[in-house]
Image: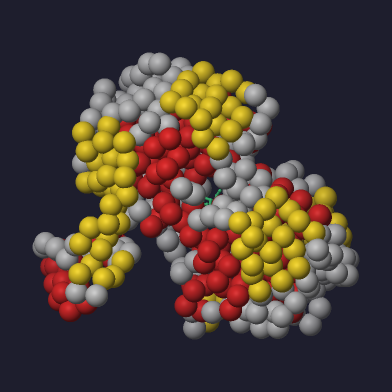
Amino acid sequence: MEFTFKFKVYDTLHHNHLPNYLICVIKRVLKSYIFYLGVIYLEKLVINGPTRLKGEVTISGAKNAAVAILPATLLINGICRLENLPNISDVKVYCKILETLGAKIKWITDNEIEIDTTGVTCAQAPLDMTSKFRASYYLLGSLLGRCGNAEVGLPGGCNLGARPIDQHIKAFEALGAKVDVSQGKITAKAKKLVGTSIYMDIVSVGATINTILASVLAEGTTTIDNAAKEPHIVDVANFLNTMGADIRGAGTDVIKINGVKELRCNSSYSIVPDQIEAGTFMLAAVASKGDILIKNCIPEHLDCITAKIIEIGGTVEDYGDSIRVRMNKRPNKATVKTLPYPGYPTDLQPQMGVVLATSDGTSIIHESIWESRFQYTFELNKMGAKITAQGKSAVFEGVKDLTGAPVYATDLRAGAALLIAGVIANGETQLYNIEHIDRGYENIEEKFRNLGADIKRVSEPNAKIDC
Ligand code: EPU
């Protein structure tokens, strides 16, 4: 019997600072279990470098817009069509969750679906699926809006550190819901949702979108002050407005939502190109001293990345709906601080880390969004980088070259960064835990292969766990 085993446990053990003897015991138990199951297959990427990436790449729809727009379809009672949907595992999981709630989903192409929400009567999302999946918190706002109640598994902390949802809860309560967090789930109930003014204590993408979702069908006007301004927030608002909502000011820090009685069905919406995927390829061009034409992107969403690339010695040409990035030397040193949009995005911090790992001089990155987003630096150091990370800052003493090594993706963007590191490193890199990458990047190895990278996905039997 063959199994594809998504092997997160190994990684989790090492990043939870458990005592060595405990890690050893857990590994032994796992080892017996693995032999009991039979042959275990792990998927990994094997990358041979160095390669200067050259050619064209087409950007897919935005993951973080898709995982908000899918639950937003619950506010419609009928059929709608989504185009330019990224074909990634997060989207597939979300579709499964919607189906368990009673939605009918028809895949028209790999990137287009038709959703019929007429049969959604249940407001209890499957706890096992939702508690593992961060963006499931959008079901709270959308189910609350549709049914007046919602029950969703409590999304835990993740590899980026603590991820509280106090601002989401504060907004639901302000709109008139009673929220209870207990027994690993969040329950929200409201007889009636009534628009009000909500000031976000923290600029939060998730809380801003969730408040929009909960207030679209509420009575009266809701105002969100200190709202997040990311392109995917504008996209969620555009989707809802296309369906008949009345949301104004998305993309600024004050958003006004005039509640409507119902949304229209039978409309189509095309999801915005992924800002982070585009930025990932921009930084891949810089790191590999390559030349990439990035098609189907919105250059304005990439302004802060463009500015940094120019600062470190690269060239960026804007062609309206595509962008060409070239680099022909070692990157200059730089200081980068992650900030909410329009600042430098945290989701492109690890990819920039790879660029600065080989910069000419000493660079610094300050991470101001997540408390634990430098785990990838330990993996990069295995490849010869000289990075010292402490708390929310890391110092990158630039080295000339990286060398291939076995490395582990600790989260989605760390995975993308290590993939780029593998492309520019001398020799072979084996990249494990690639299910993280599959969550958010469509056909990633094919896209890199088309740019000249020597990269293949390998499934290997693996039951070897050494203490
Ligand atoms: N925060 C609170 N309370 C809240 C909500 C957030 O304290 O109620 C804090 C967070 O702990 C964090 C900061 O506010 O320190 C910003 O968090 P935000 O709510 O903006 O993040 P999120 O909505 O949970 C989304 C993306 C992340 C991305 C961040 C920041 C989705 C599904 N996820 O998360 O994307 O890093 O915004 O831009 O949209 C990724 O795609 O790899 C990813 C992690």
Percent position (x, y) of residue 274? 58, 44
Position of 306 relative to 150 (above/below) = above
Image quarter of the C terminus: bottom left
Percent position (x, y) of residue 46? 27, 44
Depth order, front residue of 53/353:
53
- Residue at horizontal 30%, vertical 67%? 5
Horizontal placement of 268 versus 464: left or right? Answer: right
- Residue at horizontal 72%, vertical 60%? 81
Percent position (x, y) of residue 446? 42, 43
Position of 185 relative to 314 (above/below) = below
Q: Is residue 276 visible?
A: yes
Determine the image quadrant of residue 355.
Answer: top left
Percent position (x, y) of residue 139? 63, 70
Image quarter of the N terminus: bottom left
User: Ligand 1 shows up in which quadrant of the image?
Assistant: bottom right
Determine the image quadrant of residue 261.
Answer: bottom right
- Residue at horizontal 66%, vertical 31%? 321
Depth order, front residue of 147/435:
435
- Residue at horizontal 58%, vertical 36%? 343
**Number of labelled discs?**
0
Horizontal placement of 253 versus 109: left or right? Answer: right
Q: Is residue 432 visible?
A: no
Position of 136 relative to 250 (above/below) = below
Q: How is the image coloured?
A: secondary structure
Residue lying at the far front of the rendered structure: 108
